[in-house]
Image: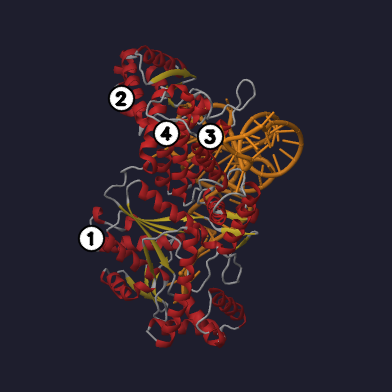
Amino acid sequence: MLQNKFKSEFAQLASKAFQATFANKYKETGDETVFSASYILENIEKPKDPTKGRFAFPVFRYGKLLGDNPPSIAATIAETINQTESKLIKITSIAGFINIETDFTVEASETIIDAISNDGKYGSSDAGNGKKILVEYSSPNIAKPFGIGHIRTTILGNSLRRIFLKIGYDTIGVNYLGDWGTQFGKMIVAYKKWAKPELDGKETVSDLLEMYVRFHDEAEENEQLETDARSEFKKLEQGDNENKALWEKFRKISIDEFDRVYKIMGIDFDWVTGEAFLNDKMESTIEAFEKANLVSQSEGATIVDLHDEQLPPVLLRKGDGATLYLTRDLSGFLYRAKEYKFDEMLYVVAVNQSVHFKQMFKALSMLEDAQSVSENDKMSTKGKHVEFGMIKFGDKMMSTRKGHIIFLEDVINEASKLAKQKIEEKTPDLENIDEVALQIGLGAIFYSQMSVRRQKDVNFKWEEVLSFEGETGPYLQYTHARLCSLMRNYTGELNADIDFALLDNREEKRIVELVADFPQAIDDAARMYEPNMIANHLIELAAAFNKFYQRKDKNGKTDKIISDNKELSKARIVLVKAVQIVINEGLYLLGIKAPKAM
RNA sequence: GCCCUCGUAGCUCAGUAGGAUAGAGCAUCGGUUUCCUAAACCGAGUGCCACAGGUUCGAUUCCUGUCGGGGGUACCA
């Protein structure tokens, strides 16, 4: 990264400056590490207020060591550095901070050339080379519709997959369908009781949902239904033909439906699997725990006691012998560990399942301990629950069981309908209106999920998801369309001979910095499993650009990007191109399409 | 009861490897277009950063406790 060039230049010079100016004290302290270039490099920070400087280095910790006050130290070091006539950086100091300004022409030219020459690859890195990461996300339940409740895992996971690919990981996006479990007992009971013969073979997911909701309604009055459901599921697990046929039917209806919705949304997976896939792997999982002497019987169930006051035991088998979700997840982990030898396994699942994952990782760790797996070969430490907050609707939690659900597709339709109205009003000549309207509608929905840190609970509000103004997906898309429009309008030459020094106003400078910092935003997002950090960065960049786009000159007239001043226009248009590349790529990482016009 | 998580402007939220006077959007009010896409831009106001301690030269950020919201706490997922 370009930043490192400036930072290490500073670190070298500052380290020397400390030696030169505080030679005696420097020796006395006996602590030379804090004066080393590498230590200084590590502690360079970015001021929250960008007008303070490109980078900053606080010297407070040197106060005691050097027996001087921080402002004075900062001033002395700054002065010394400035005497060395560095071409790359210029130093000022204030109140204990050394502020670093970079040579703007160097930063602008290198950043813009880097972005343009790499195009879509700008911001890519090899940080993850040789490493494999699995990202499990979306994972809808068969026989249930795709509700708004699944939106966060789907959008977050899709984005994380793209982010890790971007930084060089061998990335495998996994859709782990909920295609097994007691809920199928419920569905089977419901179907056998209430299926409409005339619908046979034509049932849709809504029909399935109707039965599911009816089951829960009636089960409140009639406990027998729950018992029946458990026994139907057990029959299914034992291979009962009729139940198996029903299960396959439900599964097919659902998967076809999911595929259709994923296609609309532009969500990709590398491996679509499910719980049922693990059916023949369950026995060996339970055996492994038995061999490790970790299994016991309790209240009729087969359990693994985690010996942890905070964690309930893992139930491998229920009292009736059937397996549970956790049993299947354990099997899934062991299978993936063996087949993929991953370096990380991310589970993008809501926070209300955190105990489940704690139990799972603890059980796996105990298993590996019992098997004397060496610390280096342990897989149990590589699982990570990437948890996110719940979606509420009108202060109520969503609940499929109560039929309390907003269909994702309704949200998509509503959003694109609104987008279409807006296009017809603003740019009626646009060619592919329906396509762009969908992209914008999805942009609004996707962004609404990315604009908040994942840990937070979110309230689903139509007016928020359908908002196209301010900090929204459509704002970013609009900015992108504007950038594309500028490039279409530019008819001048675009040779390599560009005078970057012409980009000298504050707005242009800010834009260059944000373009330069884009790779860092990607790394941060990956480190924190937090696409929100990319979304924030894009908003900042788009805002900086829009400000520049509409800035006025001394006479109060718009200072246009494309003007009679050919050299200036050329320098500005390459900046425009660089911004367009970053926004396009950033939106891609969030799973959002960037139309060229809207 | 215990565990996890969140608590920043009227509303929704940034501020995530502790730093310099805490920032955006929405909403409200006012302004900008003889058109490089006004889905934009400019201007105006608002904060005991839930509360109380602690660590630190420095805490919205880390630690402890309290209060409040949400989630979870063996045969659902």
Q: Position of residue B7 (x, y in %)?
A: 59, 45
How far from the left and from the top, in percent, is residue A263?
Answer: 47, 62
Q: Is residue A267 left or right of residue B30?
A: left
Circle 2 residue:
A36
Identify the residue under disc 4: A516
Asked if disc 2 and disc 3 are in contact, CB closer than 8 Å, the reply is no
Residue A20, percent from left and from top: 32, 13
**Which is more foreground, mark 3 or mark 4?**
3
- Circle 4 residues within 10 Å: few <14, some 14–19, many ≥20: many
Q: Amino acid at mark 4?
A: Ala
Chain letter of disc 3 in the image: A
According to the image, label 3 marks what residue? A545
SS of the residue at dot 1? Answer: loop
Q: CA distance from mark 4 to mark 1?
A: 47 Å
For the residue pair B71 and A572, the one nearer the viewer reads as A572
For badge 3, the amino acid type reads: Phe
Which of label 1 and label 2 is nearer to you?
Answer: 2
Q: Secondary structure at mark 2?
A: loop
| For marks 4 and 1 on the same chain, the one whose residue lies earlier in the sequence | 1
* Kind of residue sitting beneath label 1: Ser
Q: Earlier in the sequence, mark 2 or mark 3?
A: 2
Horizontal arrangement in the rendering, residue A435 relative to residue A277 (left or right)? right
* Above or below A149: residue A84: above
Subunit of label 2? A
